[in-house]
Amino acid sequence: MPNTPPPAPALSAAPHEVSGSDAPRNEYTVDELARVTDTTVRNVRAYQDRGLLAPPEKRGRVGVYDDTHVSRLKLINHLLARGYTLANIQDLIKAVDEGHDLRSILGLETAIGGRWSRERPKKYSLIELLQMFGDKASPSALGKAVDLGLLERDGLSFVSGSPTALAAGATMAKEGIPLADLLDAVGIARPHFNAVAKALVDLVVRQLDRYDADALPPPADVPALIEAIWRVRPLAMVLVESEMNRALEEASGDYLGDRVAAIMKKKLGHAPEGTPAEQGASKKTKPGK
């Protein structure tokens, strides 16, 4: 994830010119683009034909897409889900000529809707998954991983949107953590992560609250707004990591305390005289203290 906003494209720029050569960016084949935006290659081609999506950069015979395409496809999918037709969306995009050039619009789109992860999806054969997880990669476990969206079926293979997370899960499984329990933990934690993500995205896009909800910001404000959003995005991730570390330390500390207390109870034949918190409270309330 870039820490500084990549330069937005000029009015006539192609998508591959969105980022300068010194700015990191995600790149995708058409299959990868379709996968990360939850659409199909056929739709990508159709949107290009209608002028809703800019063509990719050509490298030989391969078309290379980037995050400007991701954000545009996410916008199209969102509008379609709200009942707009492709003709409506096409008219809307063509009508954005109220002083806003393509540079501002695409830059704002990417700052808000661009991917937060720089990971690229990776395809795994069933044999590769068995090598990673051993006999724990049972049909039921794979089915649950698919239901959670951790894996996606692709013919006889599977695609992971986060190879790093998949590798971490494989390591934990090899350390003896039951894969079913690990998948259950992901399912339990996900709503909480969704709530955290919603709160942090609200912080990022709250930069738009000063403007009317049904209007774009004034053209003169857009460059500074884009820069502000790109500055806030990585800071939101810092907050997530910091709070997650705090919560893990607290949870592991509580567990360790409970485990030690249980051992002490077994050794002493009775429970300690109050929990540490209760003992501390009693000390504070002793007469004369």
Image (spheres, grey):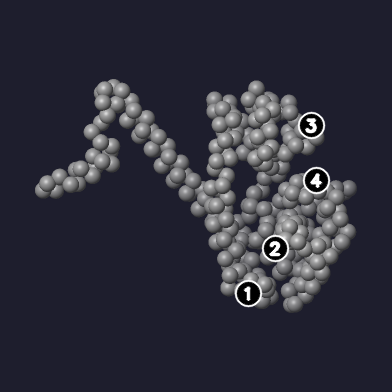
Q: What amino acid is found at the position of numbered circle 2 in the picture?
A: Glu
Q: CA distance from mark 1 to mark 2?
A: 17 Å
Q: Which mark is residue 31?
A: 4
When asked about the image quadrant of residue 282, the answer is top left
- Report the residue at 77% width, 75% height from top: 97
- Dot 2 falls on a residue whose secondary structure is helix
- Dot 1 falls on a residue whose secondary structure is loop
Q: CA distance from mark 3 to mark 2?
A: 36 Å
Rendering coords of residue 284 (x, y %): 19, 46
Marks 1 and 2, the one that precedes in the sequence: 2
Q: Is residue 2 above or below residue 125?
A: below
- Report the residue at 56% width, 27% height from top: 178
- Report the residue at 56% width, 31% height from top: 181
Rendering coords of residue 219 (x, y %): 68, 75
Q: Is residue 158 above or below residue 228?
A: above
Q: CA distance from mark 4 to mark 1?
A: 37 Å
* Depth order, front residue of 142/249: 142
Marks 4 and 2, the one that precedes in the sequence: 4
Q: Which residue is tagged 3?
A: 156
Q: What amino acid is found at the position of numbered circle 1 in the picture?
A: Asp
Q: What amino acid is found at the position of numbered circle 3 in the picture?
A: Leu
- Dot 4 falls on a residue whose secondary structure is helix
* Residue 195 seen in this snapshot: yes
Q: Which residue is tagged 1?
A: 212
